[in-house]
Every structure is written in structure tokens, then in C-alpha cells.
Image: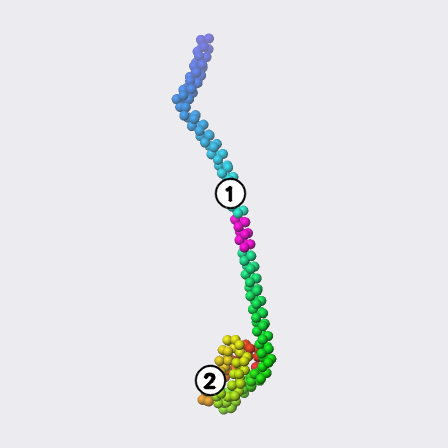
Amino acid sequence: MATTFLSSASTTATHSSSSLLLRTQSLVYPHRDNAKRLLILSKAASESQQQPSLVLSKRSLSISLVTSFVFTLAGKGASNSNAAILEADDDEELLEKVKKDRKKRLERQGVISSSNKETGYLQEVVYKLSKVGQAIDKNDLSAASSVLGGSTDSDWVKKANLAFTKLSSSPEEKTEVDTFNSSLASLISSITKNDVDSSKIAFVDSASAFEKWTNLTGLVAQLKGL
């Protein structure tokens, strides 16, 4: 019995000591429990704040993407509209140019149709150049000289320039007329000096300028031998 009592007393004493130790620790170190409690609360609060922030970030990203897409479509729409406007302007300019070119062509055809005399003068130029070319090819400068005459004051040259003046309208055409006259003067001079090589060069220049002029004016179809 005594043994049982001692055992019971010992157990009771041990339990009492343990309970007292726990109470003593709680009283002596109350901040440990508070620290754990604060840590748990802080973690919970942090998680609750991160969740809405994540949702907000996703929502902001979605809005940003939609906005960018809308502005991109708007930009493409504006670019397409501007391109359409420019294309329409180009079409109008092209149409206007075609109308002007057609008007000039009709006017030119009218002038050519009413210039039979001038066309005859130009046909004489074709005949002269053909004969001179054949003579120079044979190195017969005497025959070439008899065809051309002794100077640019020859009757056929004056008549040719009357036709050039009436039928030339553009700067390009007038330039070819000037080239023809200067090359013709060189040709006559070279033949007079009996310079075969220079005569051939001057002849090619004269014939080329005349042919270019007839193409520019549209007279190439009216003249025989070109």
C-alpha cells in the first residue's frame, strides 16, 4: 500500500511538475506564443494579398493586349485608307496624262494632215541623204557634194528648216533639228575638204538626228525610205 501510494504520489507529483513547468514557461516566455501567432497571421495575410494581385495582373495584361490589338487594327485601317487615297490620286493623274497625250496626238495629226507641202520638203531630205550615203560608201565625195550643194544655204536645206519649224513643238524635237543642222554643216565641210572619214561620221550623225526627229513628231510613217 505504501508502495502504491508512493507510486501514485510520485505520478501526481510528476504531472503537477510538468503542468507547472508549462505554465511557468508560458508566463516566463509569453512572446514565443505571440510570435508564432503573428507569424501565422502574417503568412495568411500575405497569401490573401498575393491572390488578388495576381488576378489583377492577369486582368491588366488582358486589357493591355486587347488595347494593343485594337490600335493595331486602327493603324492598319488608317494605312489602307491612306494607300487607297494615294492610289486614287495616282489613277487620276495617270488618266489626266493620258487625256493630254491623246489631245496632243490628235493636234499633231491635224497639223501633219494639213502640211502636205512641208511633208514634201522632208521627203526631199530623205532622198538627199540616201544619195549622199551611197556616194560616201563608195568614197565618191564628188558625187556627194553635187547632191548636197556647196553650203547650208542650199534651197532644199532652207525648205527643210521651214518644215522643221512648223512641225516641231517639243524641246526634244527642236534639239534634234539643231543636231541635224550642225551635223549637216560638218558633213558639207568634210566633203569639201575631201575628208572621207570625217564625212562618214558627219553623215551618220545627220541621218540619226533626222530619223529621231521623224519618230518624235510621228512623221516617220508619212515619209518613204526611212
Report crowding for label 1: few under 14, some 14 to 19, many 20 or more residues within 10 A (C-alpha): few
| Residue that numbered label 2 is attached to | 186
Magenta segment, principal secondary structure? helix
Of marks 1 and 2, which one's residue comes earlier in the chain?
Answer: 1
Image coords of residue 110 (percent x, y): 59, 77
Residue for badge 1: 60
Q: How many marks?
A: 2
| Dot 2: element | helix
Q: Is residue 70 magenta?
A: yes
Amino acid carrying label 1: it is: Ser
Quadrant housing residue 217: bottom right
Most extreme residue toward the top, as rendered? 1
> Residues under labels 1 and 2: Cα distance?
85 Å
Q: Secondary structure at mark 1?
A: helix
Check disc 2 and give the amino acid type. Ser
Q: At 45% across and 31% down in the image, what residue appears?
A: 42
Mark 2 is surrounded, within 10 Å at the Cα level, by few (under 14), some (14 to 19) or many (20 or more) other residues, namely many
- Image location (x, y in percent) of residue 208: 52, 80
